[in-house]
Amino acid sequence: MTHSLLLHTSRLTIVGISDINTRDLIDYFTLNREHLRFAGGRVPETPEEVRAVRDNWLTQVQEGREVRFFLLQEEQLIGVAGISNIVRGAFQAAYLGYNLAEHCQGQGLMTEALEEIVAFAFSALNLHRLMANYRPDNVASERVLQKLGFVREGMARDYLRVDGEWADHVLTALTNPSWREN
């Protein structure tokens, strides 16, 4: 089930997948292609690839395996975040991932957005644990996660393929002190 999601910060509006169109995603990926390659994974290059990514996100959301967030500043898409690989049962956890337009770096926008997204994950989704991983050379992500209270749990060698190469990642997690059994 797709539902409209709306969160606000002092500078951002955060919407769900049902409120974002393919054209905005095409523009976002086109303008930030080189910058986003650093983050890992393949950046979609054609409108068809962007549509396929959006369709995959929509399927994951509808099946309850993830929640996708789109960061808007003055109606312009400037970032994407996701709570993915949601596992229930004894685990009650998920991964947190995010990226931000290059021209918005260093302004505290991602920290601001993730404060709301983490609160959503812990309250609305009632997750017990969020995990977020970053490359050791990604100092900006390290700072964002530290500000949010994520704790470093270790280093994973050759963890994720980034731009055709296996890259080490720092593993971090944050637990929900208010988790409740349903």
Image (spheres, rainbow, N blue to C red):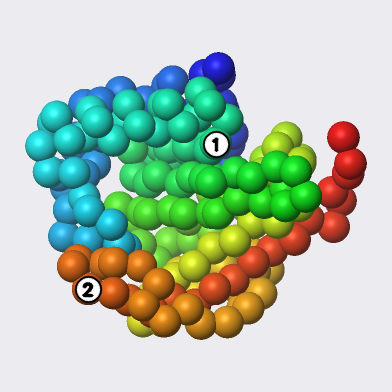
Q: Is residue 23 visible?
A: yes
Q: Mark 2 points at which residue?
A: 165
The part of the image, by quadrant, that contains residue 74 is top left
Q: Do we see residue 13 in this rendering?
A: no
Q: Neighbour class for label 1 at 10 Å: few (<14), some, many (≥20)?
A: some
Q: In what quadrant of the picture does the N terminus appear?
A: top right
Q: In this view, does 182 lie to the left or right of 135?
A: right
Q: Which of 52 and 29 is in front in this view?
A: 52
The image position of residue 39, as x and y in percent, is: 32, 63
Q: Give the left or right position of residue 2, taking residue 128 as reference.
A: left
The residue sitting at 21% across, 34% down in the picture is 50
Q: Nearer the viewer, residue 81 or 140?
A: 81
Q: Position of residue 88 (x, y in %)?
A: 70, 42
Q: Point out the tag, 2 or 1, that comes first from the N-terminus.
A: 1
Residue 148 in the image: x percent, y percent?
Answer: 64, 64
Q: In this view, does 36 lie above or below 38?
A: above
Looking at the rendered structure, the kind of residue marked 1 is Arg
Q: Position of residue 6 (x, y in %)?
A: 56, 28
Above or below, 11 against 170 in this view is above
The residue carrying mark 1 is: 65
Name the residue furthest left.
Answer: 46
**Residue at horizontal 56%, vertical 68%?**
145
**Among the 4 quarters of the image, the one containing residue 154:** bottom right
Type of amino acid under label 2:
Glu
Give the secondary structure at mark 1. loop
Alpha carbons under labels 2 and 1: distance apart: 27 Å
